[in-house]
Image: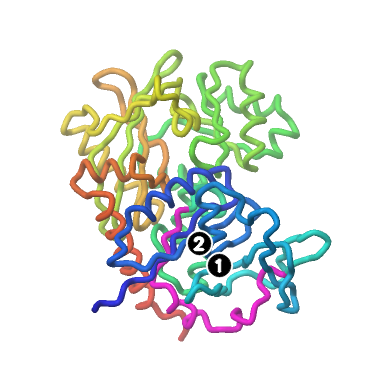
C-alpha cells in the first residue's frame, strides 16, 4: 500500500486574522482526503504558543486551549516540566506517534512568561536533532496563517530553516505580498497600472500631522483609502471622504503598523468602483482562474463585509464577473504578472478595481498570498468555477509545495 503523505495543517496565530485562520483550517481538515494524507493539526494561540494534540483541536473549535483545572506541561530551560501551561514550543510543534516534536528555529533566549516563572520556548532535547531528520516526520506543512507572523515571511523562514516543504510563497514572496508599500513598488517596476498612493510612517504622522496632511493632499485627491501597510482582511482600513476624516483614519491604521499606505480612490467622489478578484495557482508557470466580482453590502469590502455579514443583507459574490473577453484576458494577464513580480508561489488571490462605466479603466489593487480558504471563500470558489474542485485544489497545492521543495534541493548552498 502506498504510504500516506503526512501533512501538518498550521493555523491560528497572533494576528488580527486569527479567527479567519481557524475557519480556513477547519474547512481544509474537513475536506482533505484521509485516504491520501495523515493529517497533523498544529495550532498557535493568540499568545504565540504552539499547540498540538487535543490542545490544537480545542483551539480550532474556539474553546480555551487548556480547560480550566487541567495542568498541562511546558519546559523551562532545564527541560523540566512546568505545571500550569499547555505543552508548547516557541518554534514548531508537530506530532509523532501522539508525541510532541520540536523543529529547531528560534534562538534559545526567546521566552514566554508563565506566572512568576520564565519558560524557555526552545529548550528541548529534540532541538539538538538535525533539521533533515526532523523533516522526515512531516512531508509538507499547509500553513493557513493569515496576516502578521504567518503570511509575511516569518513562518516561511522558520520552515525553510527546518527544511520542510510547505504550501504557498517563500520568504520573499510572502513578505512582499504582505507589505503593501513594497508590493506597490514591485508592481510599479513591472509597469502594472495602479491608483496613485503615498506611504508615510507612524513616526512621521505622530511627529507632524499637519505636514503629513499637506503631503497627502498635495499628491492625492479625496476620497482616499488609509491602510496599515502590513495587515490583511481589510483590518484597520478606512475610506476617507474629506479632510475631516483623515486624522481618525491615520490614527486607526497607525495602531496596526508602523507604515501607512494612503491611496487615491478609483473613480473620484461618489464613485463606487467594481471590486474584481482572480485566483492564481502554480509555481514558475502560474495559471489564472476566471474573474469574480464582489458587490459589498457596505461602502467598500471591509472586514465586516467579509466576515460579519447579516443573512438579510450579505455581500454578493458574482462568479464569473460580467466582463468582455478583452477585459477578462487583461485582468488574468495582470494577475499572473503581479504574481511573478512579487516572486510568489503556490497560490495567491489578486484584487482589482475597475472604474464605473462600460469603458472604465482597470487598476491592480493588491495581492494576497494566503487568502481565505474556507470552502465558500473566493479563492476556492474561483477555482471551482474554473473546473477545479476544493478537494482537488488542496491536492494540487500539496503537489506544488513538494515540487518547489524539490527544486530548492537542486540548489547548492555551499562550495
Q: What secondary structure is marked by label 2?
A: strand
Q: Using the numbered discs, state the Cα–Cα distance from disc 1 to disc 2 in whole angstroms.
A: 8 Å
Give the quarter of the image for residue 165. bottom left
Q: How is the image coloured?
A: rainbow
Image spot of residue 106 (x, y percent): 63, 69
Label 1, on which residue? 92
Q: Bin the neighbour count of mark 1 within 10 Å (Cα to Cα): few under 14, some 14-19, many 20 and up.
A: many
Q: Does residue 139 appear anywhere in the picture?
A: yes
Label 2, on which residue? 42
The one nearer the camera, 56 or 190, is: 56
Report the quarter where the N terminus lies.
bottom left
Reply yes or no: does residue 141 show up in magenta.
Answer: yes
Give the quarter of the image for residue 113. bottom right
Q: Identify the residue at image location x=58%, y=74%.
A: 104
Q: Give the mark nearest the N terminus, 1 or 2.
A: 2
Image spot of residue 339 (x, y percent): 35, 50
View extreme (front): residue: 69
View extreme (right): residue: 116
Marks 1/2 in contact by CB < 8 Å: the verdict is yes
Q: Identify the residue at image location x=22%, y=49%.
A: 388
View extreme (top): residue: 270
View extreme (bottom): residue: 415
Reply yes or no: does residue 53 show up in magenta.
Answer: no
What number is the disc on residue 287? Answer: none
Span of residues in magenta = 120-144
Reply above or below: 356 against 233: above
**Residue 3 located left or right of residue 309:** left
Q: What secondary structure is marked by label 1?
A: strand
Q: Does residue 175 appear anywhere in the picture?
A: no
**Residue 47 located left or right of residue 240:** right
Q: Identify the residue at image location x=46%, y=74%.
A: 163
Amino acid at each position: 500500500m502506498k504510504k500516506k503523505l503526512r501533512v501538518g495543517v498550521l493555523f491560528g496565530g497572533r494576528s488580527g486574522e486569527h479567527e479567519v485562520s481557524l475557519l480556513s483550517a477547519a474547512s481544509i481538515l474537513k475536506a482533505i482526503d484521509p485516504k491520501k494524507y495523515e493529517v497533523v493539526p498544529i495550532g498557535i494561540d493568540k499568545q504565540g504558543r504552539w499547540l498540538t494534540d487535543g490542545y490544537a483541536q480545542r483551539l480550532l473549535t474556539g474553546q480555551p486551549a487548556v480547560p480550566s483545572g487541567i495542568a498541562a506541561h511546558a519546559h523551562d530551560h532545564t527541560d523540566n516540566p512546568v505545571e500550569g501551561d499547555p505543552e508548547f514550543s516557541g518554534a514548531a510543534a508537530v506530532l509523532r506517534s501522539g508525541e510532541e516534536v520540536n523543529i529547531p528555529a528560534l534562538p534559545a533566549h526567546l521566552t514566554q512568561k508563565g506566572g512568576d516563572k520564565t519558560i524557555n520556548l526552545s529548550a528541548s532535547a529534540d532541538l539538538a536533532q538535525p533539521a533533515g531528520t526532523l523533516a522526515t516526520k512531516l512531508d509538507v506543512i499547509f500553513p493557513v496563517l493569515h496576516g502578521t507572523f504567518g503570511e509575511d515571511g516569518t513562518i516561511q523562514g522558520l520552515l525553510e530553516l527546518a527544511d520542510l516543504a510547505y504550501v504557498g510563497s517563500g520568504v520573499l514572496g510572502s513578505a512582499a505580498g504582505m507589505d503593501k508599500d513594497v508590493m506597490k513598488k514591485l508592481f510599479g517596476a513591472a509597469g502594472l497600472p495602479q491608483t496613485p498612493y503615498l506611504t508615510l510612517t507612524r513616526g512621521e504622522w505622530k511627529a507632524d500631522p499637519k505636514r503629513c496632511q499637506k503631503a497627502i493632499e498635495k499628491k492625492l485627491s479625496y476620497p482616499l483609502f488609509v491602510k496599515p501597510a502590513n495587515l490583511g482582511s481589510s483590518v484597520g482600513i478606512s475610506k476617507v471622504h474629506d479632510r475631516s476624516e483623515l486624522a481618525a483614519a491615520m490614527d486607526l491604521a497607525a495602531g496596526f503598523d508602523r507604515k501607512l499606505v494612503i491611496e487615491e480612490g478609483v473613480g473620484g467622489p461618489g464613485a463606487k468602483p467594481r471590486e474584481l478578484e482572480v485566483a492564481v495557482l502554480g509555481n514558475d508557470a502560474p495559471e489564472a482562474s476566471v474573474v469574480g466580482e464582489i458587490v459589498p453590502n457596505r461602502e467598500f469590502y471591509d472586514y465586516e463585509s467579509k466576515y460579519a455579514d447579516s443573512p438579510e443583507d450579505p455581500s454578493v459574490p458574482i462568479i464569473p464577473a460580467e466582463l468582455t473577453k478583452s477585459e477578462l484576458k487583461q485582468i488574468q494577464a495582470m494577475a499572473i504578472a503581479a504574481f511573478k513580480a512579487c516572486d510568489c508561489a503556490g497560490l495567491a488571490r489578486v484584487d482589482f478595481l475597475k472604474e464605473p462605466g462600460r469603458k472604465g479603466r482597470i487598476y491592480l489593487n493588491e495581492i494576497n498570498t494566503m487568502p481565505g480558504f474556507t470552502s465558500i471563500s473566493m479563492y476556492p470558489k474561483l477555482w471551482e468555477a474554473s473546473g477545479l474542485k476544493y478537494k482537488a485544489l488542496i491536492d494540487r497545492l500539496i503537489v506544488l509545495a513538494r515540487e518547489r521543495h524539490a527544486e530548492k534541493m537542486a540548489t547548492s548552498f555551499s562550495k
